[in-house]
Amino acid sequence: MDKSVTRSNWVGRKPRHRVLWLLLLGGLCGALTVGVAVGNENTGVFDGDPPSWATNLGGSLLLAGLAIEIVSIVWLVRHGGSRADRTSTLWRLSWSRRWSLSRQVRRDDPAPDEDVVLLGRTARAMIEQRRSSMILVGITIMSMGQAFLSFAPFFTVVFALLALLAICLYVFAIHGSRRAEVFLRTHPDV
């Protein structure tokens, strides 16, 4: 069996950690929303005058997000994630064909006449997406820090949209990688 299938993952192993992260993220979003709505009545759409607590929190979040970005990229490079499947035959396929393969892997329902090698490569590529999903977390935290630093409604809306997109992509990547692991366990011949 492939080592990437049996490797433990910090996401999903302890649900209480996910709850704590979601509570922390929700608390920070609430502080940003209340701070922009109540703390500064004369804030323009693009520029604001943040209070000192928002400036300190925004700078800290910006640096924390940057640190997560750097650590994630270094970790990807050191563990081969940046080179993974760069020469894969999946890149030669059309977008609809790749989507069809990933749908078969997610549903654990391969077509009878499907190429098992392509299904195996698709499942392994879906598992590798979990490694690069930490970059989304760093981008989201950096965006939150920028929203606190600028303390303006425009950057709050941009952060909210970016956070929503990042959360959806992160959940999709984690769900897909778990389904791919199940697929590889139930179909060891691929």
Image: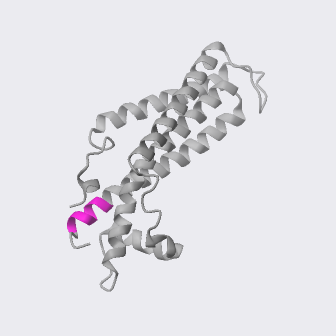
Residue drawn where x is 26% and y is 46% of the image? 8
Q: Position of residue 177 (x, y in %)?
A: 35, 56
Give the answer, above or below, for where 35 lies relative to 112: above
Residue 102 quadrant: bottom left
State how many labels appear: 0
Position of 23 compared to 161: left or right? left
Residue situated in front as seen by the camera: 178 or 154: 178
Q: Position of residue 165 (x, y in %)?
A: 55, 48
Residue drawn where x is 51% and y is 36% of the image? 70
Position of 46 compared to 19: left or right? right
In the rendered image, residue 105 lying in the magenta stretch gets the answer no
Residue situated in front as seen by the camera: 140 or 159: 140
The quarter of the image holding the N terminus is bottom left
Residue drawn where x is 38% and y is 47% of the image? 79
What predominant SS class does the magenta segment belong to? helix
Q: Position of residue 29 (x, y in %)?
A: 54, 31
Residue 101 quadrant: bottom left
Give the answer, above or below, for where 111 lies relative to 75: below
The answer, for residue 151, to whether it is visible in the render is no
The quarter of the image holding the C terminus is bottom left
Q: Which residues are magenta?
A: 180-186
